[in-house]
Image (cartoon, grey):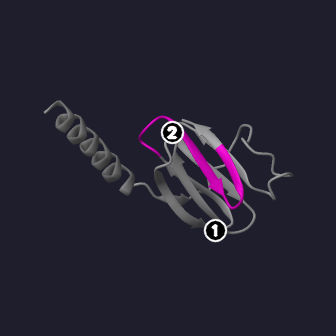
C-alpha cells in the first residue's frame, strides 16, 4: 500500500509539472537588457543569455533553436527564436539548463 501511495504521489507531481510548463512560451521583447551576460558573445557566436526575476532572456544576432530543461532533464520549453531579444518567464524557481544551438548554459532562477 505504501509503495502504491509513493507511485501515485510521483505521478501527480509529474502531471502538475507538465501542466504548469505547458503554459510557458517565449516572447520577443524590446526591453533593454542590463547586467552581465552568463555567456561571452565573442565565444558563443553572438549569443547572450541573461536571467532576471524568474525570466530567462536570450539575445542573438541570428535565429537559433533553444531548449530549456529542468536540472532533472525534463523539457520545459523548445522553440526557434528570431534574431533579437526574447524572454521566457518561468513560474518555478530552480536551476535550468538552457541549450542554444551547440551552447549549453546553467541558469539559476
Q: Residue at x 37, y 57 (%)?
A: 22
Kindly identify which residue carries mark 1: 82
Which circle marks residue 54 in the picture? 2
Residue 10: x, y in percent? 28, 40
Density class for disc 2 (Cα within 10 Å; few <14, some 14-19, many ≥20) is some
Residue 8: x, y in percent? 20, 41
Density class for disc 1 (Cα within 10 Å; few <14, some 14-19, many ≥20) is some
> In terms of sequence position, does the residue under pointer 1 or pointer 2 come before the other?
2
Q: Residue at x 72, y 41 (%)?
A: 38
Residue 75: x, y in percent? 48, 54
Front residue of 106 and 26: 106
Residue 73: x, y in percent? 50, 48
- The quadrant of the picture occupied by the N terminus is top left
Q: Is residue 47 above or below residue 1?
A: below
Q: Is residue 56 above or below residue 86?
A: above
Answer with left or right where residue 25 lies relative to residue 32: left
Q: State the extent of the magenta-drawn residues as a range.
A: 90-105
Amino acid at each position: 500500500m505504501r509503495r502504491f501511495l509513493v507511485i501515485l504521489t510521483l505521478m501527480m507531481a509529474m502531471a502538475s509539472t507538465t501542466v504548469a510548463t505547458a503554459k510557458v512560451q517565449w516572447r520577443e521583447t524590446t526591453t533593454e537588457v542590463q547586467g552581465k551576460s552568463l555567456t561571452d558573445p565573442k565565444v558563443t557566436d553572438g549569443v547572450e543569455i541573461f536571467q532576471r526575476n524568474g525570466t530567462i532572456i536570450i539575445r542573438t544576432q541570428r535565429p537559433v533553436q533553444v531548449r530549456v530543461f529542468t536540472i532533472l532533464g525534463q523539457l520545459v520549453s523548445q522553440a526557434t527564436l528570431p534574431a533579437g531579444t526574447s524572454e521566457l518567464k518561468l513560474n518555478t524557481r530552480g536551476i535550468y539548463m538552457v541549450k542554444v544551438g551547440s551552447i549549453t548554459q546553467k541558469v539559476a532562477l
